Image (tube, rainbow, N blue to C red):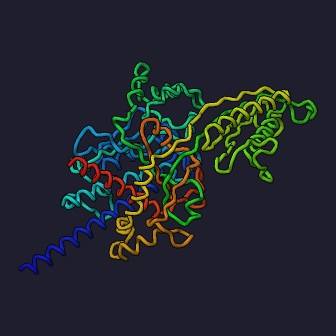
Amino acid sequence: VLFGCFIACLALKLTSASNLADFAHQVLHKETNTHLQDLAKISDTEGSLARTFFSPAHKKSAEQLKEWMQQAGLVSWMDVLGNVHGVLEAATPGQPAILVGSHYDTVLDAGKYDGAMGIIAGLSGIKMAILSELHAQGKLEQVALPAGSDVHIPTDLAQGLLAVPVHLVAFTDEEGVRFKSTFLGSRAVAGTLLKHGLLDAKDAQGSSLREVLVSEGRASAGNVLDLVAALAMNSSQVAEYVELHIEQGPVLERKNLALGVVSAIVGQSRMWVSINGTQGHAGTVPMVGREDSLVTAAEAITLLERRCGGGPGAPAAGTEGVMEHQESDMLVCTVGEVRVWPNAPNVIPGNVQFSVDIRTKDDALRDKVVVNVTQSIYDLCARRGVSCHVSRNHDADAVLADTNIVADLVEAIRTSRDLLGMALKKPGGEGAGAAAASCSAGSSGEAECGGDNIPVMVSGAGHDAMAVADITKFGMLFVRCRGGISHSSLEHAEEDDITASAAALTRYLLAKSEAAAAKAS
């Protein structure tokens, strides 16, 4: 009898573990990657991906994200600015939440993974944490595992399950394509959007953010200020912020590793330069004496490149015309947008406008470069007999990730191998160990998703974490992307690497929940 009971209990345990593995495969792997591809189909342009603030595709994708959050058992809504929220309350109410997020807007001709991956993999990580806790409490059988469709977790079953609250936010606008100012969504949540005067930021049609919110029916002229102010969260509501994101650089791929953890994000400044020359006939105005705005802009752009140590021969810092800096400062300067008027082949351009993006992890150096470049452009315009205006329209200081969160994310990657193995195995296929060991290196061969070889790195790209850092500590987990390419239709991340990031977040959240439960007891 005892032997029979032992066999029955063992069979039940194996069946339960197998069932959890099936959920892991469905949620962490299939749903995550399918939802990413589905979201990428929601675009304002044919043949490429574009979702800018409150465009038709932007609004449609917000509704889709809200639906997926609700399927995970989260309480979900869209706020006045278009941020999509999904909340999982804790067993004990009133605690500050772990905020998880990224952005769902895109640049023009975008890749599928920038921002979107952090939301989708973040949601899957939360969903799997719920399922894991249901499994631990013997309640997993209350959730169906349908063939060929998403797992739906009843809200009343999910809420109050973990010992810590989790708040997922899909930020409405990080890229700043429409209003030329980044972090609209995350700055609203951090309570700094109004301080930066961004309600008065204008798009290319001359409409301010304030006017757009009213015309979209999100607010009235009388209450828009109060509604936006009410979005602000504070340290009593948020314990920490965690963001998953593709690396947007080549470091992880060169190391042949799927995941890394961020220790800091470089600071950045954005400027807009407008040069007014004298428009004229290309064939009748002599070369001598021309007031050509485009030639002036070209010289200004090459001047910027040299100031930051770029160009042919890569002049060393300290040589004439190059700002003094170290390689470790990660100083980079970019002109990514140029507008020429009237942009005709037989007309000397009368006006040229272009963007300037300056980044480094040394904020004092960044400020020196901005001041130097600004004055140099004014001097250049005076020498060439044209007028110009340089505006500094965005600044974000470098931020340091919390060392404890960094350590906890590293540990979460290490301890997620078994869960990742369950997620990557095919039903009836190889075991968890083999699946975890492969961890999808794409075209570069074997890769490691766990173990001790987990790089801690500096991000050269700006992220919503920079804005949220105003109210709480943060950490970020990076996912390898092919060739380090981003902001491009060529952007790509391997499915198994994305799954690995979701599995790591699940382990991170479960560890936080276990620690909170132990502390409460």
Q: Picture coordinates of residue 113 (x, y %)?
A: 50, 53
Residue at horizontal 57%, vertical 28%? 202
Left or right: 225 in relation to 419: right
Instruction: Looking at the picture, tell me which residue is in the foreground, 452 or 202.
Output: 452
Does any portion of residue 459 appear in the rendered image?
Answer: yes
Q: Picture coordinates of residue 318 (x, y %)?
A: 77, 44
- Image quarter in which the N terminus is found: bottom left
For residue 474, which quarter of the picture? top left
User: In the current view of this chain or complex, which residue is farthest to the left?
Assistant: 1
Left or right: 287 in relation to 426: right
Residue at horizontal 54%, vertical 37%? 182
Left or right: 184 in relation to 372: left
Q: Picture coordinates of residue 397 (x, y %)?
A: 56, 37
Q: Establish if 136 lies above or below 74.
A: below
Instruction: Looking at the picture, tell me which residue is in the foreground, 139 or 1.
Output: 1
Q: Picture coordinates of residue 56 (x, y %)?
A: 48, 40
Residue at horizontal 49%, vertical 48%? 115
Left or right: 502 in relation to 183: left
Q: Establish if 388 lies above or below 157.
A: above
Does any portion of residue 44 appear in the rendered image?
Answer: no
User: In the current view of this chain or complex, which residue is farthest to the top?
Assistant: 222
For residue 138, which quarter of the picture? bottom left
Instruction: Looking at the picture, tell me which residue is in the foreground, 439 or 287.
Output: 439
